[in-house]
Amino acid sequence: MEINRFSNCRKTGRAAQLNRRGRLAGMTLIEVAISLAIAGISVGGVVTGYVFSASQMEQSACSTAAEFMARQRVEQARSAKWDTLANPPVDEVVINNFPPLVSALDIPVVGNRLLYGTNTTTITIVSDDPPLKMIRVDCVWSFMSRGLFTNTITAYRSPDQ
């Protein structure tokens, strides 16, 4: 009786091995399909991340160039002559001396796709005694049909002494 029981175990063991081999062959195809899907999703995520980061980098470069353009205009207004002690007094820090300016943003360009920014200068008298003016420059620019963006810089200016 013990021999029969042992031989039954062998038959059961061999049948289980055959069954396992059949199942492993089918699982290999499923495993390959799942791993290809995971690899595809991973590669898609990496490519999407790369495209997104490249777009953000280009937008950041445009924003930096617009800020530089606005800073140039603020420096022009800060360097304008304003001397209240001269005879007659000179005040070149007026809005008429700083009309809106449209120029290309200073960024690397591929092909002929230039991006333009528009500088608008606003000069406001803050105080008459002591004399103080606020200079505000807005640089408006657009990026890839995402709409208009504005970089604003504000500075205060007193007369030359």
Image: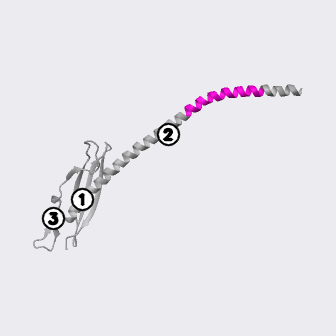
Name which of mark 2 and mark 3 comes first in the sequence.
2
Label 2: element kind: helix
| Amino acid type for the residue under numbered disc 2 | Ser
Name which of mark 3 and mark 1 comes first in the sequence.
1
| Amino acid type for the residue under numbered disc 3 | Glu
Quadrant in which residue 161 is drawn: bottom left
Label 3: element kind: loop
Picture residue at 26% right of the left edge, 53% below the top: 139
57 drawn magenta:
no
Quadrant in which residue 124 is drawn: bottom left
Picture residue at 20% right of the left edge, 53% below the top: 101
**Image coordinates for residue 90, horizontal then vertical, percent:** 13, 68
Instruction: Tell me: 21 left or right of 90.
Output: right
Label 1: element kind: helix
Q: CA distance from mark 1 to mark 2?
A: 45 Å
**Image coordinates for residue 66, horizontal then vertical, percent:** 28, 53
Instruction: Tell me: 69 left or right of 44.
Output: left
Picture residue at 62% right of the left edge, 27% below the top: 26
As displayed, is residue 43 above or below residue 62? above
> For the stretch drawn in magenta, what is the main secondary structure?
helix
Name which of mark 1 and mark 2 comes first in the sequence.
2
User: On the image, numbered disc 1 is attached to which residue?
Assistant: 72
Of 87 and 44, which appears nearest the observer?
44
Count of numbered marks: 3
Residue at far left of view: 88
The reply to whether the C-beta atoms of the residues labelled 2 and 3 are less than 8 Å apart is no
User: On the image, numbered disc 3 is attached to which residue?
Assistant: 92
Q: CA distance from mark 3 to mark 1?
A: 17 Å
On-image quarter of the N terminus? top right
Q: Which residues are magenta?
A: 12-34
Q: Answer few, some or many: residues within 10 Å of disc 3's Cα (few below 14, many 20 plus, some between 14 and 19).
A: some
Residue 42 — which label? 2
